[in-house]
Image: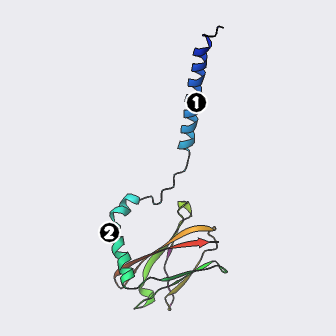
Amino acid sequence: MSKNGRWPLGIGIVVVLFVLSLIVFLVFALNQRVNLVEDDYYEKDLRYQQQIERIQRTRKEAAQPEVRYIKTSRQLYLRFRLKNDPQSLEGTLHIFRPSDSRMDRKIPLKLNAQAIQFINLSDLPPGYWKLKLDWVNGGAEYYHEQDLIIE
């Protein structure tokens, strides 16, 4: 084969390798799990003004709960400042893992007579978590968010 006869073969091999690498990349990309921060992020964006009002009400009325992580027992301590009966409070705690939505948990709030609740976190792996507290007390809605690092 002459020197000029190798060019078409070389170009053909390069093109075929390029197309094969694109196909391999496409298969790889389509098989990756995509973790959105929220599955219904668009609907939540539309309701964001209500969320802003909940946050402002929580700050204005100094209604932020006391939230502490107890390392020794791997428990979360929640204490609410309430003006009325703790049993009338309704709400949820969303334990949110930004890196993997499959680990998220939603726990209903069930306060004792002193407006305290302990939540066992021993089944959660170490790492960064976000706590999102959403509750209704006396007809008013409140919201509190806090970061948590489990070691």
Q: Residues within 10 Å of mark 2 (few under 14, many from 20)?
A: few
Residue most extreme to the top: 2
Residue 81, how many percent across, how many down?
45, 88
Identity, as a three-letter code, of the amino acid under mark 2: Gln
According to the picture, the residue beneath numbered tag 1 turns out to be: 20
Separation of residues labelled 1 and 2 (CA atoms): 49 Å
Q: Magenta: predominant secondary structure element?
A: loop
Any magenta on residue 108?
A: yes
Q: Residues within 10 Å of mark 1 (few under 14, many from 20)?
A: few
Task: Tell me if residue 24 comes above or below residue 100 in the rendering.
Answer: above
According to the picture, the residue beneath numbered tag 2 turns out to be: 49
Task: Tell me what residue is drawn at x 33 percent, y 71 percent.
Answer: 50
The image quadrant where one finds the C terminus is bottom right
Residue 118, how many percent across, how many down?
57, 82
Any magenta on residue 3?
A: no
Nearer the observer, 11 or 66: 11
Task: Tell me if residue 126 comes above or below residue 28 in the rendering.
Answer: below
The image quadrant where one finds the N terminus is top right
Task: Say how many tags the image has.
Answer: 2
Identity, as a three-letter code, of the amino acid under mark 1: Leu
Which quadrant would residue 57 be assigned to in this image?
bottom left
